[in-house]
Image (cartoon, rainbow, N blue to C red):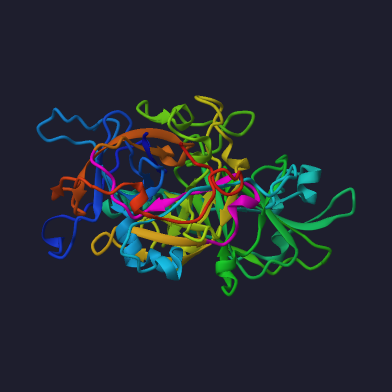
Amino acid sequence: MRSIGIAIVAATTMVLGLTTGSTMAAAQEHNFWQVGFPVHPTEQGSSGAALLNEDHQVVGTLFGGISACNNLYDESDSTPGGWDLFGKFSVAWEDGLSEHMGGKLYAESDEPVSAPSIKIRKKNKGELPVRSVVSPGLMLKLAADPAHTIVVDAEAIAEAKARFAAESADPSAAKRKMVGTHIDLKPMSAGIWQRLTAKDGTKSWRVAIRAEGAAFLRPHFVGEVAGEALVYDAADAPFGRKVAKPKSAKDDADFWGPIVKGDTLFFEIITDSDTPPAIRIDKISYGVVDMMGGEGGPSSSPEGFTPKAAGACHEDASCESSVDEDELNAVGQMFFSVGSSDFVCTGTLMNDVGTTQTPWFLTANHCISTEASAKSLVVTWEFHTNTCNGTPPDWRFSPFTEGATLIDTGAAGSSSDFTLLRLDSDPADDADVTFMGFTTKSISATEDLLVLHHPQGEYLRASQGIPLGESDPSGTDIEPIGDSDDDDDDAVSVGGDDDDDDAGCGCGA
């Protein structure tokens, strides 16, 4: 049986930025699994991927590496390349995860602890997503009115692109894929709002923002939402994405809204009030790299969506025979902000020993390590083809969740480069999801490994790997994986029922 990892990656070569030389502390242990990729590698943006063992349990998270389409693992080489490092889940468990996911009984257990995967079918049975809204502007299919459109200055866009180029070239940004940068907007006046009335009498206020050449836009709000609010990318869109302050930002004066594709954003508030809204957009996230499909701007296809062709060495995840379909729904494409930049990484929805269905979300510390970044998080679900080499999904209509609370984190230098988040909302509201199981038990030296990934945030691809050893964060101090006399019965196994459609999926069995 193959073991499975889940990842979000990029189509260009990933540069690690590994800890090396004199920066290595003597106390650092071999907290990482080294994995070689002979055919299908991971690449830049894969960070946070969950590595699963032969029982399809999480045993690590992707720290980074040197594997790429032009750098594959070949054991016949005198100095084989094409490897990545995965932080050991057992180390993260000891360093804090047990306190949150283990419960009192298992938090300090000396025995390996395991939990099964469980699958949950989406709760929403309606035609429209839970976080969707139809407004007067959409009902009337009104294009943007120049008098009520904020046009981002061309000079500001040029400065933002230059800043993006400089920051994305910084080695410290290499492991997580940088996709956007922020642009401050001029103060909004009351006159910028457009009053709309639908044929059924529903009233709203609307404003449009245009930032030429943007691959995507995301608004940052200051103030409270008074009424039902939404954002959308075109006047003829079937629905808009609901704007609501995430739970993790409930006490904040500002918050990030949903993402829309392309260089035009409509923001609309449904309200009977004749007074223009007080809420304002003070800045936007300007997409430089299209993480949804297409490069450097809105698609020219009639449907508004043109998927990019990922590197030729990447395999559609739906073509991988060892992958259970439900396992595809455990991974989420991550989008988040760090400072004035935006990135994509990978995260995995996690089960716990009590099978509480708490939306635990595991990723890498070098992706998200602060509360501010956690609050900015958008996770896109079910972002994969339904059949082998089938039609790529349209990101715009994929289920998503917004916001998270930072629960625990550990850096590579002192732990295994992990971050545990608790999502603000239940992804099962709109998506079929799997809460992945885990174990603190070691992997063996003979297991076949697999990673599922999103090149530059694209839909899932698959990559097979080979365990090479146990490593420090530099990837240069390697020890063989010890032969274990343990078997599956030696691990304390808790929770779940693999035969229950709403409890256990027996993924990959």
Residue 284 seen: yes
Indicate left or right for 125 with 15 as reference.
right
Question: Residue 119: image x %, image y %?
Answer: 56, 46
Q: Main secondary structure of the magenta part?
A: loop
Spot occupied by residue 36 in the image (x, y as percentages of width and height): 25, 37
Residue 356: % across, % down: 55, 60
What is the count of numbered marks? 0
> Residue 406 or 224: which is nearer the viewer?
406
- For the view shown, which residue lies furthest in the front direction? 489
Q: Residue at horizontal 58%, vertical 54%?
A: 401
Front-most of residues 2 and 43: 2
Residue 110 % position (x, y): 31, 64
Up-down: is 307 above or below 492?
A: above
**Residue farthest along the right direction in this orientation:** 200
Q: Is residue 105 magenta?
A: no
Identify the image quadrant of the N terminus. top left
> Residue 424 magenta-drawn?
yes
Tell me what residue is drawn at x 56 percent, y 41 percent. Answer: 382
In the displayed structure, does residue 55 sit left or right of residue 327? left
Q: Is 223 drawn above or below residue 68 in the view shown?
A: below
Segment tinted magenta in the rendering: 423-445
User: Is 382 on the left-hand or right-hand side of 135?
Assistant: left
In the picture, residue 338 is in which quadrant? bottom left
Query: Looking at this view, is 142 or 434 the one in front?
Result: 434
Q: Residue at x 35, y 27 (%)?
A: 313
